Image (cartoon, rainbow, N blue to C red):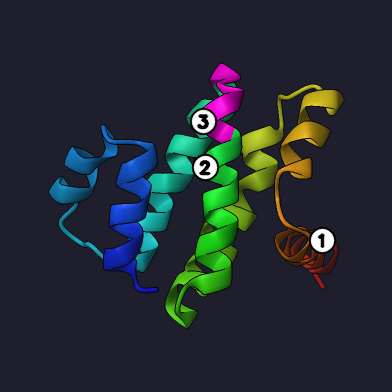
Amino acid sequence: MNYLQVIEEIKDFIPEIENELRNNKSQNAYSIIQSFTNRIKNMIRQKDRNILFKCLNKMDKIHKNGDIILKTAIETTFIYSLDNCTAFCSEEYRKVIFSHISQDLQKIYSRQIYSHGT
């Protein structure tokens, strides 16, 4: 899966993101994942759980099936921003969010958190 296929997949979940993605001058894997991550952040803040959990699942599938550029974009954009996304969530809500993230992405998250600064 490449970033052009990901655009189509994301639009299925969030149709209103199409204009944002189309108007993005630097359409590449990183900008697409950044836009998707920003939408997920907003869903977390608004506690829009139904679509949020579907989007987290989609992010997992993109990471699993995406090319190396998409995988790296997810690991350096989405995973890196998880702490910031969930910083003001209750502990319970944070646990629910992380329960909808694959074990593989949780391991990557843990590696980033525990290796930071070393």
Q: Residue 16 location in percent, x, y?
A: 26, 32
Residue designated by label 2: 55
Task: Specify the quadrant of the image occupied by residue 80.
Answer: bottom right
Q: For the stretch drawn in magenta, what is the main secondary structure? A: helix
Q: Nearer the viewer, mark 2 or mark 1?
A: 2
Mark 2 / mark 1, whichever is N-terminal: 2
**Placement of the N terminus among the 4 image quadrants:** bottom left
Looking at the image, is 76 positioned above or below residue 53?
below
Secondary element at image label 2: helix
Q: Contact, CB < 8 Å: mark 2 with mark 3?
A: yes
| Three-letter amino acid code of the residue under disc 3 | Ile
Residue designated by label 3: 51
Q: Residue furthest bottom?
A: 68
Pointer 2 local density, CA inside 10 Å: few below 14, some 14–19, many at least 20: many
Q: Residue 118 location in percent, x, y?
A: 82, 73
**Mark drawn on residue 110:** 1
Secondary element at image label 1: helix
